[in-house]
Image (cartoon, grey):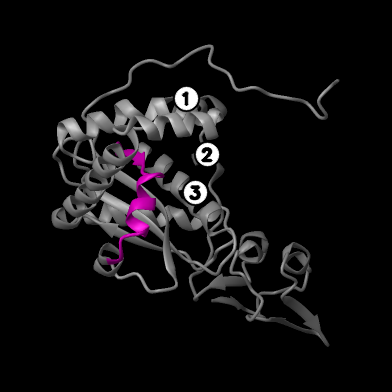
């Protein structure tokens, strides 16, 4: 909870101006917060020049800009970031997993009540792998084997024909190796949110990217299990196993481990299509 130290506050009004929920009020010389509408974005704490606001009595600290990476360092980090599917058998220390997961709190969000489940229990990770394998096997059996299904998809949804064909060898590889995941990760982190809160999916993806990048600086590799979390969300037994309530859903899933493969080269020349303003006719 955000708290105000009125002995430090000089009533400069910065917190009032930055509060996008308009929940900070200054009435009759008294500064107060309407916690009913406070989204706990903590921008008021971050902007206060007198450090008169804090979170749960933890005093804020000024940024040390000497620790900021310069643009070339950040560019190197972003170019190195790759999805890793091959992990070593080395485990990740629990305190390090908590540290990595904790940086999700600094991501842009609309759902301020997201929570995180860290799974490093081998039994549960094997359960995740088994569910992915079972789903992939059944999908291949019922969709790809019958030729009539492919003909119907080609006829009814021609725009997805290439996606359909592209997914086939991936499923065949899963069935061939008899494992849902290419190699067992040391841990899986899941972002959990309430189904009734708007934009929880988008909020979880921001949080995952914070986790991904911070893990990278610690030498930990990541793989976002975007499609696979759909499999986990429809399995009632799994949701019960990890302690999800009826109103909750997995909105983000990421596998972590120490990489068994190293990327050495920056990819040069690959660019995204950029458009300025309105498209010219």
Q: How many marks?
A: 3
Which disc is residue 68 wearing?
Answer: 2
Q: Residue furthest top?
A: 269
- Residue on which the image places disc 1: 162
Q: Which mark is residue 135?
A: none
Residue at left 48%, top 58%?
105
Mark 1 → mark 3, Cα distance in angstroms? 26 Å
Q: Point out the frontmost of discs 1 and 3.
A: 1
Q: Earlier in the sequence, mark 2 or mark 1?
A: 2
The stretch of residues the image draws in magenta is 218-236
User: Is 230 located above or below residue 163 in the figure?
Assistant: below
In terms of sequence position, does the residue under pointer 2 or pointer 3 come before the other?
A: 2
Q: CA distance from mark 2 to mark 3?
A: 24 Å
Mark drawn on residue 205: 3
Q: Position of residue 271 (x, y in %)?
A: 58, 18
| Mark 2 vs mark 1, CA separation in Å | 44 Å
Return the disc, 1 or 3, that comes first in the chain's sequence.
1
In the visual, does 17 lie left or right of 96?
right
Which quadrant of the rendered structure holds the C terminus? top right
Dot 1: few (<14), some (14–19), or many (≥20) neighbours within 10 Å?
A: few
């Amino acid at each position: 909870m955000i708290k105000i130290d009125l002995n430090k506050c000089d009533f400069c009004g910065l917190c009032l101006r930055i509060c996008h929920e308009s929940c900070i009020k200054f009435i009759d010389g008294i500064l107060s917060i309407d916690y009913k509408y406070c989204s706990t974005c903590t921008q008021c704490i971050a902007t206060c020049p007198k450090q008169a606001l804090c979170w749960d009595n933890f005093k804020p600290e000024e940024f040390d800009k000497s620790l900021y990476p310069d643009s070339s360092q950040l560019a190197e980090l972003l170019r190195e970031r790759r999805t890793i599917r091959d992990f070593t058998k080395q485990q990740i220390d629990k305190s390090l997993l908590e540290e990595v997961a904790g940086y999700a709190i600094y991501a842009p969000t609309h759902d301020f009540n997201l929570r995180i489940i860290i799974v490093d229990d081998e039994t549960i990770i094997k359960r995740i792998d088994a569910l992915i394998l079972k789903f992939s096997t059944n999908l291949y059996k019922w969709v790809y084997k019958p030729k009539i299904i492919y003909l119907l998809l080609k006829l009814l949804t021609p725009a997805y024909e290439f996606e359909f064909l592209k997914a086939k060898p991936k499923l065949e590889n899963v069935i061939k190796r008899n494992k849902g995941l290419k190699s067992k990760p040391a841990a899986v982190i899941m972002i959990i949110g309430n189904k009734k809160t708007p934009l929880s999916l988008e909020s979880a993806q921001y949080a995952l990217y914070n986790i991904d990048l911070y893990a990278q600086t610690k030498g930990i590799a990541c793989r976002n299990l975007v499609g696979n979390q759909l499999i986990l969300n429809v399995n009632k037994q799994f949701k019960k196993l990890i302690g999800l309530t009826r109103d909750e859903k997995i909105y983000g899933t990421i596998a972590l481990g120490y990489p068994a493969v190293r990327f050495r080269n920056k990819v040069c020349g690959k660019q995204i299509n950029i458009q300025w303003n309105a498209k010219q006719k």
